[in-house]
Every structure is written in structure tokens, then in C-alpha cells.
Image: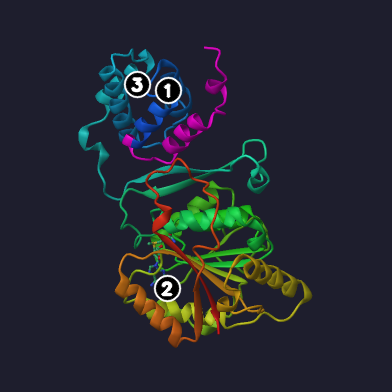
């Protein structure tokens, strides 16, 4: 079939379809995108594309029950419209039927691979550092169980949002030392390394999450060393075991980041006092003065001052570190408790959701509702 989409997808509809497949979006979403790609139905061309770019690309690491379920829905969709199903797709479905039992989709703590594609719109390719494809593909091992690793082995929506922020405003993060709390699968850190943050330290208070995070860094060629002091290799992202409850000032003094990040970490009222204490300690420390630090810091402040209509509320121009927190507010009482603790800790907090808006780099992801996410900047008063 002489069709350049089959060799290399360039049509955004096909790019969305393959990106949704790689990110393991729901099979209903995939069928909807397949229909869009075929102008209303799953044509032979679309099926050929799915065979080449989805089924054949999905190696042994892909979750077989997901593939089986997708094929089942795809085939019934084509048959419902009295179309012809490609033999290859039938055969692969028959293979899964005979080799997988229904209970193979067991939830448990089974690990799966998702591939998150950040798609840079035309004209923004320079942001991607991959100007030829305009796409950044990040493989991540995750759990099917959202609670595994104290919730840290799943990708939460705020880390997708924070990643879009980092990739949309790379100048805010490049050459900055960045420290993330509650890093989960490590997506934010991988994006920070991509935009060339000068140092990236990820942390979490759950050991199994930390082990999974390290594996993800290795998958992305950013393999971490256990001890952050051991290496200066710029390609390495460091991982630190940091439960907020036991973090001491002395321990936190080791880091002195320019930017502290956190995604979906405001949810457990019990942990909030400890989280705020960690944020307060990190925000209340100045690096020893150096001209380059001042330039880095000024650049960040100036950008925020320019971007935010209410620069004064943010605290105007200052040299200290800032924290960027993205969060879905699931329980308003918990969030209000966080605000009260922030105030007691002498921190100021500004909602910058409307002023610091990232580009939509995940247009194919129907499971991700960016309108539910708020973005906050915290500084020491
Ligand atoms: C909802 S998950 C968010 C993970 C990741 N930031 C994301 O958005 O995908 C919360 C993360 O915070 C970590 N966490 C929860 N309580 C913690 C604590 N007391 N100390 C350190 N980390 C904690 C969990 O292990 C988990 O990785």
C-alpha cells in the first residue's frame, strides 16, 4: 500500500491515534480516534495503519489484555459497519483469544508500560529539542493499581500538567536546580532533564515508588545514582528517599534548589503539616551568592513578573527559590487546611492557573482533563 501515513504518520489525526494507543488511553477513546482518522469509519487504510504502527510496534512490554480488548472492539466496530476486517487483525485477535485467559487482565500490582507523547504544534518545534518529529516520547513503567507505592506508581494528571508547563516554558527551568517532592513515576524529572535543568533531584517517601522511578530514569537514559552527591554527570537525575515526616532541616539544607516542584501532593490531611514544613524549609534558604545564580533567579522572576498580571501578589522581584505546585482540588477542606498551614509557615501562595498556561501538548489524551488542575507558586514571605 503506497501510503506515507503507513510509513511515517504525519497527519495529526493519525499521530493522535498512535499516541493515544501508546499512552494506553481507553479502548473507547482509541475507537473514536480511529473513526476520526477514517473520516467517520474504521476504513481499510486506518486498519492498516493500526496494524503497522500500533499492533506491530507494541513489543512484548505492552499489556496483552489491553491489545486483545482493543482488537475486539475494533473488529466489532468494523463488522457493525459491514466493512472488511484485515486478516492480520483477525489473526492477532485469534492468537490472543487462544493464549490469554479472561483473568489475565488481573489488576493486582501488575506493571505495564505507557509511552507518553508530547506533541509540539507547528511553530513550537524548537521547544521540543526534536525538531524533526516535533514529538517527545517518554516511556514509563506504571502499575495497574493506582494505590501501589502509596499512589506513586501511577501517572497523576497534575504531573502531566506540570510536564506540559516545563516543556512550554523551558527557559524557566533550564540552568536551574530543581527538586521535586512526591515524584511518583518520575515524569516531571524526565521533562526537567529534557529542558536542561542544571540539576534534577526527585524524591519520594515510598521505597517501591522510588525503585520504580529509578527504573523509569534508566528507561529514559537518565539512570540515577543512589546518592546525589556521588556524581556530577549532567545526564543523571538523582533520586532521594524523603518521607516528609522525617525530613530534617539538616537533610534539606543539602539541596538548596532554585525551584521546588510538586504534582498532586496535596491530598492527605495527615501529611500536610509535614509537606508544608518541607516546602517552608526549602523555600527559606538562600544559596551562597554567585553572579550566575543571581542571573538565573532574575530570569525566572522577570518571566513571572511579565507573565502574571498580578506580579505584586507573587511577591515582586526576589532572589529566593520558588515552588510550583500543580494540584487537582478533590476535597476543599483538605485544600483549605493546606492554605492555612502555608500561611502559618510564612509562605505566600498565588494561583497562576490563568496566567501561566502551558501549551496543550497532549491533545489526544481524553483521560486527562486539564481544566481540573490548578497551578500555584509559593515563596517565602
Ligand atoms: C498522588 S501521587 C502523585 C505522584 C506524582 N507526583 C504524579 O503526579 O504523578 C503522591 C506521591 O506523593 C508521595 N507521598 C505521599 N505521602 C508522602 C510523604 N508523607 N512523604 C513523601 N512522599 C509522599 C507518594 O509516594 C506518591 O508518589
Residue named by callout 2: 243
Quadrant where ligand 1 appears: bottom left
Tell me the SS state at disc 3: helix
Task: Give the mark, 2 or 3, whose residue is nearer the N terminus.
Answer: 3
Residue named by callout 1: 38
Between the C-alphas of marks 1 and 2, the distance is 50 Å
The answer to which quarter of the image holds residue 365 is: top left
Q: Residues within 10 Å of mark 3 (few under 14, many from 20)?
A: some
What is the span of residues highlighted in magenta in the rendered image? 1-28
Q: Which mark is residue 216?
A: none
Q: How many marks?
A: 3
Tell me the SS state at disc 1: loop
Q: Is residue 261 magenta?
A: no
- Say whether residue 231 is left or right of residue 206: right
- Say whether residue 201 is left or right of residue 112: right
Residue 156, position as x, y percentages in the image:
40, 56
Tell me the SS state at disc 2: loop
Q: Which mark is residue 92?
A: 3
Tag 1–tag 3 contact (CB < 8 Å) = no
Could you tell me which quadrant the C terminus lies in? bottom right
Can the viewer see residue 337 in this picture? yes
Seen at 49% across and 51% down, the residue is 216
Is 377 rendered above or below residue 136? below
The answer to which quarter of the image holds residue 230 is: bottom right
* Ligand 1 under 8 Å from disc 2 Cβ: yes
Q: Is residue 27 magenta?
A: yes
Amino acid at each position: 500500500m503506497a501510503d506515507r501515513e503507513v510509513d511515517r504518520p504525519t497527519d495529526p489525526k493519525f499521530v493522535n491515534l498512535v499516541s493515544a494507543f501508546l499512552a494506553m488511553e481507553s479502548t473507547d477513546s482509541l475507537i473514536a480516534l480511529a473513526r476520526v482518522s477514517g473520516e467517520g469509519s474504521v476504513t481499510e487504510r486506518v486498519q492498516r495503519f493500526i496494524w503497522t504502527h500500533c499492533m506491530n510496534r507494541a513489543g512484548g512490554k505492552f499489556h496483552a489484555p489491553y491489545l486483545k480488548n482493543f482488537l475486539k472492539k475494533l473488529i466489532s466496530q468494523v463488522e457493525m459497519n459491514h466493512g472488511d476486517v484485515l486478516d492480520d487483525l483477525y489473526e492477532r485477535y485469534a492468537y490472543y483469544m487462544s493464549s490469554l485467559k479472561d483473568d489475565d487482565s488481573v489488576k493486582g500490582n501488575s506493571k505495564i508500560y505507557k509511552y507518553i507523547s508530547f506533541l509540539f504544534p507547528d511553530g513550537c518545534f524548537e521547544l521540543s529539542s526534536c525538531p524533526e518529529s516535533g514529538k517527545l516520547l517518554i516511556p514509563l513503567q506504571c502499575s495497574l493499581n493506582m494505590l501501589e507505592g502509596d499512589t506513586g506508581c501511577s501517572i497523576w494528571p497534575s504531573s502531566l500538567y506540570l510536564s506540559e508547563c516545563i516543556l512550554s516554558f523551558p527557559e524557566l527551568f533550564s540552568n536551574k536546580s530543581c527538586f521535586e517532592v512526591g515524584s511518583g513515576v518520575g515524569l516531571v524529572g524526565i521533562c526537567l532533564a529534557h529542558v536542561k535543568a542544571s540539576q534534577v533531584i526527585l524524591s519520594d517517601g515510598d521505597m517501591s515508588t522510588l525503585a520504580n522511578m529509578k527504573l523509569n530514569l534508566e528507561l529514559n537514559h537518565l539512570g540515577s545514582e543512589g546518592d546525589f552527591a556521588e556524581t556530577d554527570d549532567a545526564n543523571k537525575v538523582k533520586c532521594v528517599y524523603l518521607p516528609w515526616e522525617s525530613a530534617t532541616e539538616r537533610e534539606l539544607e543539602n539541596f538548596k534548589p532554585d525551584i521546588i516542584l510538586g504534582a498532586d501532593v496535596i491530598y492527605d490531611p495527615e501529611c500536610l503539616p509535614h509537606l508544608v514544613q518541607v516546602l517552608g524549609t526549602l523555600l527559606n534558604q538562600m544559596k551562597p551568592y554567585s553572579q550566575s545564580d543571581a542571573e538565573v533567579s532574575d530570569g525566572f522572576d522577570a518571566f513571572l513578573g511579565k507573565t502574571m498580571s498580578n506580579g505584586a501578589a507573587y511577591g515582586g522581584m526576589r532572589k529566593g527559590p520558588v515552588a510550583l505546585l500543580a494540584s487537582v482540588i478533590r476535597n476543599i477542606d483538605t485544600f483549605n487546611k493546606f492554605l492555612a498551614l502555608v500561611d502559618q509557615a510564612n509562605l505566600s501562595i498565588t494561583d497562576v492557573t490563568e496566567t501561566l498556561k502551558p501549551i496543550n501538548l497532549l491533545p489526544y489524551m481524553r483521560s486527562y482533563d486539564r481544566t481540573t488542575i490548578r497551578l500555584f507558586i509559593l515563596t517565602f514571605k
